Amino acid sequence: MTAAFSLEGITKRFGEVTALDNVSLTLNEGEVLGLIGQNGSGKSTIMKVMAGLHRPDTGLIRVGGNVVQLRSPLEAAHVGIGLVHQEQSLITSLTVAENLFLDKPSTSTSMGVYRWGDLHDRAKHQLDKVELDIDPFTPVSELSFGQRQMVELAKVLSLEELVHGHLVILFDEPTAVLTPPEIQALFSQIRRIKHRSSVVFVSHRMDEILDISDRVYVMSDGRNVADRDKAHVNVDELYELMVGKQRVDRTARKPREAHLGAEPALILKNVTVPDEIDNISLELAPGEILGLIGVQGSGAETILRTIFGMADSWTGEIEYFGAPLRVDSPPEAVDRGIGYLPAERKTEGMIRNTSVSENVAITYGWQHGHGAGLISRGRERGMIDGWVKKLGIKTPSTGHRIDNLSGGNQQKVVLSKWLFGKTLKVLMLDHPTRGLDPGARADLFAVIRELADQGLAILLVGDTLDEVLTLSDAIIVMKDGHVSARIENVQAAPPSEEELVKAMV
């Protein structure tokens, strides 16, 4: 096989943290290389070194056998390397066509003025490559997440007209919020482009890795611990290589009776948010985990945001432990003992440029003596250290900046700020395992079960059907803003995944 790209002895440090430790990697022409590892293992750092976003401290980078210096994404693009971002890079206020060529030389501009006809035709050509049938002049803000992901891919594939040689395309968690049909559409495109491209594919989902990859490269603590042909490895072996222990088979929760007959923590009656959800009714009891599932835009996330005071306008009734509830802002919801873990952790869940400790204590720190913006001592510090250990948050210290943690570890910090509270009664989780590796996901499952056993009412929008089936006592399926199915006694009589999919689409 001919090597399209290689790293040789790459080391990268960030202060006291060694993110990559003498890593070597070879990517062959026409190959899909699956890249896996726990949160903080070095996966994202490798991708950023390959894409020119980080410069290694030591080691060599070769493209087609030639040593290159990648000092920026533009230099990486010039040698045929493109990154499809996990945190999408599109500018939502611009059109699809403008985004496709914003960072590349283009014949569609003359002295800073667009030649709109030429721009339209060139953009349409790129969109045709990924079989995305939309108007190139559509604002990105009007696209679904799946459509945006295809535009990201089209943006990278526009390198084909700029580079004569082989392309290297990097996918960093591209399926995190895609529906099953969108994932299969993406995989179809990856298989199609292999004739001229090599691919590095990062995912925490082992089944996806084995589906799309030719070879699997395993990272742990900044080092390579295994390199396996996919024909000679299975999900359990990959899990053990990555986590260092055998995977525990999926065990559903034991059927719970404690919440049956208890006064509901939450009751929604005919709740409507214009153009998003219509006449939604549900009940959630203390100690119950109620799973909400649906495709992107089904309305499941809107239910959570409405309860948390984030909907601009809504009608209907919400009762909270028997009393009417209407909150107009998240602080009011917090004061009533309602917590919300958003899917968009970077923009809605965490405070950037601050420490892990400050992010954990920001919501309920006052209950443990936190005040006046000071980092707490004594009991509060002990509580923070306890949650960092319990959730397995990888950080040099609780004083470390949250921005410098991996995405999965940031997610765990955002969750811990809610668990830190003593007055929390209802916790709403919107894709809580997004960005978590299998080991961290299993640990989080245990925490969620424990919280429910202690009487916390939990409303869960899951990342996968398996996740919802594993954790939920009852499930509500959402479709086009309506409830399309309700399943009770999930743990005693679980529905099939096929049954749930039929109700979703």
Image (spheres, rainbow, N blue to C red):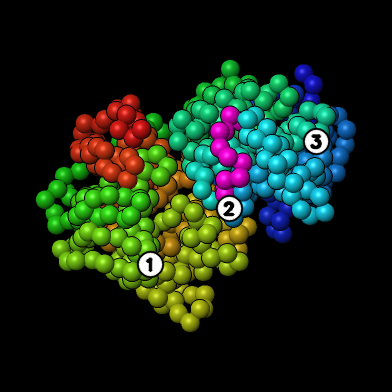
Q: Which of marks 1 and 2 is nearer the N terminus?
A: 2
Check if residue 323 falls in the magenta segment.
Answer: no
Give the CA separation, mark 2 to mark 3.
25 Å
Residue 280: percent from left, percent from top: 24, 50
Question: Which residue was labeled with disc 2?
Answer: 92
The boundaries of the magenta stretch are 130-140
Query: What secondary structure is found at the residue carrying circle 1?
Result: helix
Q: According to the image, label 1 marks what residue?
A: 330
Name the N-terminal-most of marks 2 and 3. Answer: 2
* Amino acid marked by disc 2: Thr
- Residue 331 visible at all: yes
Quarter of the image holding residue 457? bottom left
Residue 139 on the magenta span: yes
Instruction: Give how far apart the Cα atoms at labels 1 and 3 are.
Output: 48 Å
Frontmost of labels 1 and 2 is: 2
The residue at 47%/65% (across/down) is 360
Q: Which residue lies furthest to the left in this view?
A: 261
Q: Quadrant of residue 25?
A: top right
The x, y position of residue 446, in whole percent, is: 37, 46
